[in-house]
Amino acid sequence: MSTNNNTIPGKNIFIKLWSKKYLFLKVWILTFIISAAYILPEPRKYTASTLLAPEVGNTDNAGGLSSIASAFGFNLGGASSVDAIYPTLYPELISSNDFIVDLLGVHIQTLDGEISTDLYTYLHKHQKASIYKKPFLWAKRKIKAIFADKNQRGNGGKIDPSRLTEQQFYIVERLKSNIICTVDPLTNVISLKVNAQDPLVAANLTDSVCERLKTFITSYRTSKARVDVEYYEKLAQEAQINYKKAQDEYSAFCDTHKNITQQATLSKRDDLEREVSMALSIYQTMITQVEKHKTKLQEDTPVFTTLQSASVPIKPSAPKRVLFCLGMLMLATIITSARILKDELYSTIVFFSAKSKGTDSKED
């Protein structure tokens, strides 16, 4: 099988590249040194994760249809759920400013015990940075200090999620990027992953996110039932007061009208007795309603099953130092090879371009 002089035979490529083996060795050594010098000072990150299986409210009629649809890979949770916030919307909930700001007051402690503070202070003052970035970060802080916002948060201050300062905005965004929430569309299993520069902080923050998600969903799911319980408890208290008042009036009337047989007096006593009976009936009805709605509140309280608890990670998850160095070595090899074979590559491009033009001319 003949080979055109303008093409690059594989054997010739190998020979030419092999003749430059010492150049490759120099490039590899230099690339490895630069890559290692860049990636080694980068702070390590640790990832803690947990799995939750939430209880989803479904109507009885749609339960069978949802089960059949799930068997074929479809999820009808939105159609059958009685909630406005479905598990598939939990990632958007967790990434909201209100949810994130609520986390900034969480107390955290590093694994070595040297740092014990709230999450806001930890993210603001105790984050490690590469030695190459420190001069730029120092200059950035100095410039920002000149134009500092007077409304920036101090110790013990509160953050308004709807009116974040520039500093608060960057901290909130940093925290958002380190919290990853995904939901399986078929099983509704929630996967929470949190990245942090300290393994204990990552684990504790994962638990905090998990607990606050449970609290929020529980509060949402039981809001109507809690309002009903409070309403009927108020009515029960008023009914109890009315019953007590009617009973006192009846007792006082009976005490002051003993041995009296006048019809008007007897009628008044009977009226007071009926009022006492009616007040007691209303009071008992309200007590029944209170117990009924307390039972409803218990039924509406969701249950979250923890499939996998968050544990303190042992190994860092990023940066991938070995993979980074290997990737840079591969890139350096490709660039060096292209540089060595540039003349042959150019000849090949010209040859195929001319051949393509010749084919087009014959077709015309």
Image (cartoon, rainbow, N blue to C red):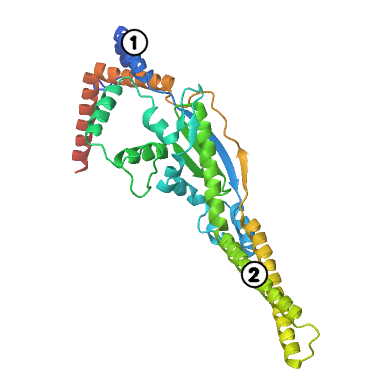
Question: Mark 1 — residue?
Answer: 29
In the displayed structure, 236 sits above or below 21; it is below
Q: Nearer the viewer, residue 120 or 33?
A: 120
Q: Position of residue 238 (x, y in %)?
A: 62, 69
State the residue at coordinates (38%, 47%).
161
Whether residue 207 can be seen here: yes
The disc labelled 2 sits on which kind of residue? Ile
Callout 2–callout 1 Cβ contact below 8 Å: no
Which quadrant holds the C terminus? top left
Q: Residue furthest right?
A: 259
Left-right relation of 50 to 154: right
Left-right relation of 192 to 43: right
Element on which disc 2 rests: helix
State the residue at coordinates (24%, 26%).
139
Q: Nearer the viewer, residue 55 or 223?
A: 223
Q: Residues within 10 Å of mark 2 (few under 14, many from 20)?
A: some
The disc labelled 1 sits on which kind of residue? Ile
Q: Position of residue 351 (x, y in %)?
A: 22, 27
Of mark 2 and mark 1, the one earlier in the sequence is 1
Question: Mark 2 — residue?
Answer: 241
Which quadrant holds the N terminus? top left
Q: Position of residue 195 (x, y in %)?
A: 46, 32
